[in-house]
Image: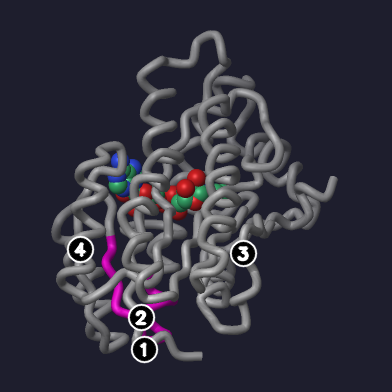
């Protein structure tokens, strides 16, 4: 499959799942705009590396996904410099773990903004172009937590359930325009986001690092293995193919059986 004529924006793609998705789309020939935080030199190395390795255009936009105006400007910059936004991957996300009664209000607001509202703002900006060209792929990196809850993740679980609802609504609105919208819902994927939440979970549940990995994280996952970023990226690439044109409004689990339980 080739995505050679397509242009993609992948939010939160300086690390983890987003970076793997951006690289996988570029490998199929799509031009990509990457986004996210990080050290300028490392981001530039990644950006230029994608261009050299995959012979595509790769741009970087540092929009903060908690700022609606910056999100819209990022989509418009991609349309201007790449020609269109055919594929939008709403992936940026953060985590915070705390009992609900102690959950810091500013963390709640930040997670709702970055993990949920940013998808709305990006979709809102990208949809007019997709509709006019009668082709588009919207992919939301949701989570097993868009389907089930875990304790101490009030904001994250709320935001991901919200993304799942937004996904279904957008899919219905765009169903006759050749534009699909789907969620990919991974279980635990080994990325910096997961690694960073280990200390907080250790504190919240009074556990050791090994106990958090084996008794909290992989306990939820019947296969007892982490999902890999490349597996998530491969599903994203498939959702961009013509074979996936009738998959829309779906929330596809990739969680080692977690939500089957
Ligand atoms: P990660 O920490 O490796 O990457 C997160 C990316 O988002 C980074 O590029 C970061 O710079 C960017 N980001 C964070 N805040 C931002 C902001 N305000 N503006 C712009 N960019 C911002 O995390 P990851 O594990 O790759 O997570 C990616 C997505 O996958 C998230 O939505 C996460 O909720 C979801 N997810 C992850 C897992 C997992 O186990 N890792 C499981 C299910 C879902």
Task: Give the residue at mark 4.
Answer: 60
User: What is the quadrant of the C terminus in the image?
Assistant: top right
The span shown in magenta is: 22-34
Q: Residue at x 17, y 62 (%)?
A: 77
Whether pointer 1 and pointer 3 mark residues with C-beta atoms closer than 8 Å, the reply is no
Q: Is residue 193 magenta?
A: no
Q: Residue at x 74, y 57 (%)?
A: 256
Q: Give the Cα distance between marks 2 and 3.
A: 19 Å
State the image coordinates of residue 3 (x, y, percent, origin top left): 42, 85
Q: Which mark is residue 6?
A: 2
Tell me the distance, in whole angstroms, between the alpha carbons under discs 2 and 4: 17 Å
Q: Secondary structure at mark 4?
A: strand
Instruction: Name the element at disc 1.
Output: loop
- Looking at the rendered structure, the secondary structure element under dot 3 is loop
Distance between mark 3 and mark 4 Cα atoms: 28 Å
Label 2 environment density (alpha carbons within 10 Å; few <14, some 14–19, many ≥20): many
Residue 4 vs residue 234: left or right?
left
Q: Which residue is mark 3?
A: 248
């Amino acid at each position: 499959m080739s995505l050679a004529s397509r242009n993609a924006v992948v939010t939160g793609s300086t690390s983890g799942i987003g970076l793997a998705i951006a690289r996988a789309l570029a490998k199929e020939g799509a031009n990509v705009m990457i986004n996210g935080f990080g050290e300028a030199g490392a981001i530039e190395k990644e950006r230029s590396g994608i261009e050299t390795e995959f012979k595509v255009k790769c741009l970087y936009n540092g929009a903060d996904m908690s700022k609606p105006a910056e999100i819209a400007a990022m989509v418009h910059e991609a349309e201007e410099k790449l020609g269109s936004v055919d594929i939008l991957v709403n992936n940026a996300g953060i985590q915070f773990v705390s009992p609900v009664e102690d959950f810091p209000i500013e963390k709640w607001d930040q997670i709702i903004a970055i993990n949920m509202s940013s998808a709305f703002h990006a979709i809102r900006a990208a949809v007019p172009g997709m509709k006019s060209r009668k082709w588009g792929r919207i992919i939301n990196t949701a989570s097993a937590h868009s389907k089930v809850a875990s304790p101490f993740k009030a904001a994250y679980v709320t935001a991901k359930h919200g993304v799942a609802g937004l996904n279904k609504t957008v899919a219905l609105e765009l169903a006759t325009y050749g534009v699909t919208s789907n969620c990919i819902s991974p279980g635990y994927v080994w990325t910096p986001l997961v690694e960073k939440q280990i200390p907080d979970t250790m504190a919240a549940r009074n556990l050791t690092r090994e106990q958090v990995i084996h008794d909290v994280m992989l306990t939820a996952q019947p296969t007892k293995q982490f999902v890999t970023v490349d597996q998530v990226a491969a599903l994203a690439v498939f959702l961009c193919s013509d074979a996936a044109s009738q998959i829309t409004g779906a929330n596809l689990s990739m969680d080692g059986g977690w939500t089957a339980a």
